[in-house]
Each structure stands twice: as structure tokens, then as C-alpha cells.
Image (cartoon, rainbow, N blue to C red):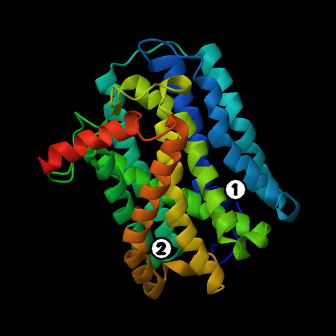
Amino acid sequence: MSKTPPTTSLGIFWRDVPLVNYALYSVGIAHAEITNLPVQRLDFVPTAIFPLLIPLLIYGLRWKQSTLPEKRVAIGICLGVPLLIGLNYVFSPRVVLSHDELRDIYEVSAIFNTFILMVHAWTHHRRWLGFFLGPCLAYGLLLENSGILLGYFSEMNYRWYLGPLPAPVATVSGWVTVYYIITWCVWEAKKCLPFLGRSAMGAALVAVAAALCFDLQVDPLACEVGFWTWHPSLKQGWLGVPLLNYAAWTAAVFPFAWILFRREAVLDLEPGEITEPLHRKWMFIQVPLALALAGILFFGFMVVIEGGFDGPTFEILDEAFKFYLG
């Protein structure tokens, strides 16, 4: 997507910052699980494979057309992750951090990570910045605060909040991070798989998979440390994370991605062209529709998962209605 293809390893590395992002999360979270938690959670470490799948997929799709420097960077990233995790397990001493310290590290690193990704976006074109800090940020802001206000989870004791809103800056900025890296990855996949450019459904499903690969590693650690706390009536699922979480992620990502990629398909837009002012304004207008579709999809998932309308999801919703409506 850059104007001239990079030829140096550093240039290729910078071009692929979203893929590097997946790799860094894979290593960083595994490091915390091995080294920093008050109770070591080695059972969480295999979840590092999920974010690594995205670089493996994109580099695999590109492989035949890649130059030798590009292949070297791809091999370095994809083999570097398991190597670093293995070395961490064998050689790193235990440095136990408190939950508050771990939350502080997460808060600062999440905001800084979003900043780096937005610099990356800006280097492509300034209008990319307006798109991901515009409709994408607005959608993520509404999603995160809605979940808290409805009582499904809470995010307490952070340093920085957006005024009276209950969602901290770190988790709101996290939605910008997620939407940027998954959209970028779909745009890259479209270059190698032209049918994705014609299929909004296929492109949206790739975006959902890319988002879940990120979350499948993040959320077990987040729940263990208490970055966010789920409503106590929600049953813990795989590695302590309620199934509602993954239903919510799927429901949140799919509608917005489908609307975005459908416009690209209908108008035959090139990757990144959706960020132009005309399309950015159109995507802003679609945010309420995306939220409505996300709600319908989420509650539909939970009816199936909980076997009806009398499960914890709807009990929490009923509590919220009673609280806000008196």
C-alpha cells in the first residue's frame, strides 16, 4: 500500500507494522504469563499461536511474489515469535508484578501502540488518520461504553478516562488498534485473493477471524489480571473468559467490516480508497446502523448459546433496563 515498495529490511518491517503488532502482542503477553503474573499461567502460553496465525497467513499468501529481503523479514517474524517465547521460558527470571503494575503497563502500552499505528497510517496518507480516528474511533467508543453501561463488564482504576465516560482511554484506543490492523490485513489479503474484493461477506469474515486471533490471547490474561471484570452471573468459559466475550467481539466486528467492505466491493474501490473524505463521511453515517446490527447479532448469538431468553445475558439486560428506567 506504500507508493514505492520498500527494498530494505527496515523499510519492509515498517510497511508491515500491523503484522509486527500481532507478533509483539504474541511475545509480550506470553512473557507476562511466564514471568510476571503472581501465579504463573503456563496454560495460557499456547494462546500465543493465535495472533501469530495472522502474519503466517499474510506472509504465506505473499510468498511467491516476495523478494528475498521480504522473505527474510517474514521468516524472522514468524520464527522469531516461538523462539523468543521459548528463550523466555528457559532463561527469564521470575519478576512478579502486582495487578496494579500490570494494568499500568497495559494502559500506557495500549495508548502508545495506537499512536505508533496511527503514525503508520499517516505515512500512507493523512486521510487514513481521519478514517481510523473518525468513524472507527466513534464506533469503538460507543461499543466499549455500551457494554459497561449495560453492566456486562467494568473497567475500574485506570489513570485516564474520557470525562465521565466509564471506558478508559486505553480500551477505547484499543478499538482503533484492532480496526486498523484487521482492516489493513484484509486489504493485504485482497491483493493476493482477488475474490475477497468482490465478496463483502468473505472480507468481513476474514476481519472477524483476524480480530478473534488477537482477542483469544489477550482476554485470558486480561481476565486473570483484572484489566476488566465480567458480571459475576456470567459463566466462565475457556481459560476463564465468558463465551459472551467472543460472541460480543464477533458481533461488534462483523457489521462494521461488512458495511465497509461492501462499499468497497460495490464501488470497486482500491484498498485504502475508502478513507477518502466522501467515503469517510458515508461511514460516519453508517455507525448507528452498524451498532444496531451488532446488537441484533450479539443477542441472537446469546439466545443460541444460553438456550433462550432467560440466561444471564438477558438477566443483566433486564437489570440495566430497571436501573435506567426506574
| Residue at (21% x, 53% y) in the render | 162
Residue 325: % across, % down: 15, 50
Quarter residue 63 falls in: bottom right
Q: Name which residue type carries label 1.
A: Ser
Is residue 305 placed above or below 172 in the rendered structure? above
Residue position for label 2: 128
Q: Is residue 285 left or right of residue 53?
A: left
- Answer few, some or many: residues within 10 Å of disc 1's Cα (few below 14, many 20 plus, some between 14 and 19): some
Residue nearest the observer in this picture, 6 or 151:
151
Residue 305: % across, % down: 54, 38
Residue 26: % across, % down: 59, 36
Q: Earlier in the sequence, mark 2 or mark 1?
A: 1
Residue nearest the observer in this picture, 275 or 148:
148
Residue position for label 1: 9
Real-space Cα separation, disc 2 to disc 1, in angstroms? 24 Å
Residue occupying the far left of the picture: 326
Residue nearest the observer in this picture, 153 or 124:
153
CB-based contact (under 8 Å), mark 2 and mark 1: no
Q: Name which residue type carries label 2.
A: Trp
- Classify mark 1: helix, strand or loop: helix
Q: Is residue 186 left or right of residue 237?
A: right
| Residue at (54% x, 72% y) in the render | 260
Quarter of the N terminus within the rendering? bottom right
Is residue 13 placed above or below 120 in the rendered structure? above
Residue 267 in view here: yes
